[in-house]
Amino acid sequence: MSLLRIAFVAGSLAASASAVEVAGSLLIDLDAVDYRAADGIWPQHSLTGIQGSFAKLPAGTPKLQTIGGKVSLVLDGDDDYLTGPLTTSALYAAGANHSVEYWVFQGQARPEETVISWSGRGAPNGSGAAFRYSSAAGSGAVGRWGGPDMGFAAPLLGGPELGKWHHIVLTYDGTTQRLYVDGALNTSEASALDALDSKPMYIGTERLPDGTDSGRTRQFSGAISRIRVHSGVLTGDQILSNYTAEAPLHPGITSVPLSHPPIHRWSFNEAVGAAPEGTLVKDGIGGLTAMIRGQGATLTGSQISLPGGLPATLPAYVDLPNGLISGRQHLTLEFWATQTSTQAGSRMVSFGRSNAGEINAAGNATAFSGVDYLSLYANVNTTTSMRL
């Protein structure tokens, strides 16, 4: 893992398009502004061909938030999905024409994250229907099971740019799937599709044919503002028209002055080279000092690289001064980091105390349990529910 910067800040950091192009008829029409937080129901925005609302799980916590200037429904990828009505033959008949259109925002995309789905995972090939914004090369855009899966193509390999709103559309005309991103055709392929009959629709996940959830690794973690499913095939011109009409409603993130300036900042801009045990790292604002514990750290002049690894290797970490967050009612922790490997319990930052007192050494020579601690994990595919 490489850390570029850690900063502490004291304090805390509906419009609709006039008309959209429709192909055939609208089967599903969802707008985040309609979500009812009180009962976890997402009703449809208009009268549609497949009637019925979507409902969250009892323990789910979808939230209405303004992300990048647009009111959206935010799902955390941890059982935040919603279950909706059963599909009709308009979607499950062999070769059924359809267009699936959605506006989504991602901060970090895992290999397969599903925005909307129906049918189910499993054989035969071409029977799935999972529409995604994720990074897998061969299935990050659409999951159909087998050969008909699709990933985003160049210049969007690995998915559209993170941290921005995107308009994603998948059309199927009975023989060919076409994928559009932000009004432009990205890729296409010939496919024979036949979804499973009369299965529930889902927002934020996909299911196995027996109705059980496919797991958190395919649950969507991001923001959704609109979802539309059409019974016909949108043309390229229609898709561009819808993108052009709704893009101004999704302006994106803009920089604003901080309401409170940072009170501490570690920029890791010390001299380039190895940073052995005991190396000091300066706080450029607050005048405090952190220390490198363990082995294998390297300073690049603008970041610190930490090796990770098993406790027996005494992998290096940055030991920040005590008392940074205790006693504060409001606090923002901000950092830039790149994770280069994955393992269970991969902590980006961790604050707290232990039942054995303060631990000032790498490895696990001293047995202890955390007490009153706050940790932020950056795991991908391994123990995905462990984030905060």
Image (cartoon, grey):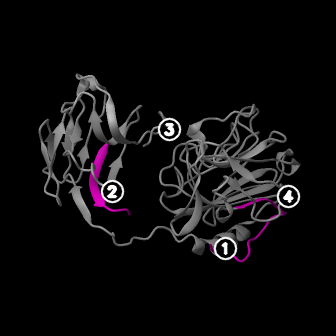
Closer to the chain start, of discs 2 and 4, is: 4
Q: Amino acid at mark 1?
A: Ser
Question: Label 4, on which residue?
Answer: 49
Q: Are marks 3 and 2 in contact (CB under 8 Å)?
A: no
Q: Are marks 4 and 3 in contact (CB under 8 Å)?
A: no
Rendered residue at 37%/43% (across/down): 339
Rendered residue at 32%/34% (across/down): 371
Q: For the residues marked 1 and 3, what is the alpha-carbon distance in whole angstroms?
A: 34 Å
Q: Quadrant of residue 192?
A: top right
x and y, in percent, of residue 235 in the image = 75, 66
Give the number of the mark in front: 2 or 1. Answer: 2
Checking the image for residue 16, the label placed there is 1
Q: Secondary structure at mark 4?
A: loop
Rendered residue at 33%/56% (across/down): 331
Rendered residue at 57%/52% (across/down): 153
Closer to the chain start, of discs 2 and 1, is: 1
Of residue 272 and residue 9, the one placed in the foreground of this image is 9
Disc 3 residue crowd, few under 14, some 14–19, many 20+, Cα 10 Å: some
Report the span colored magenta: 1-30
Closer to the chain start, of discs 4 and 1, is: 1
Closer to the chain start, of discs 3 and 2, is: 2
Q: For the residues marked 2 and 1, what is the alpha-carbon distance in whole angstroms?
A: 35 Å
Closer to the chain start, of discs 1 and 3, is: 1
Q: Amino acid at mark 3?
A: Ser
x and y, in percent, of residue 352 in the image = 29, 40
Question: Label 3, on which residue?
Answer: 385
Q: For the residues marked 4 and 1, what is the alpha-carbon distance in whole angstroms?
A: 21 Å
Question: In the image, is residue 205 above or below residue 211?
Answer: below
Question: Label 2, on which residue?
Answer: 331
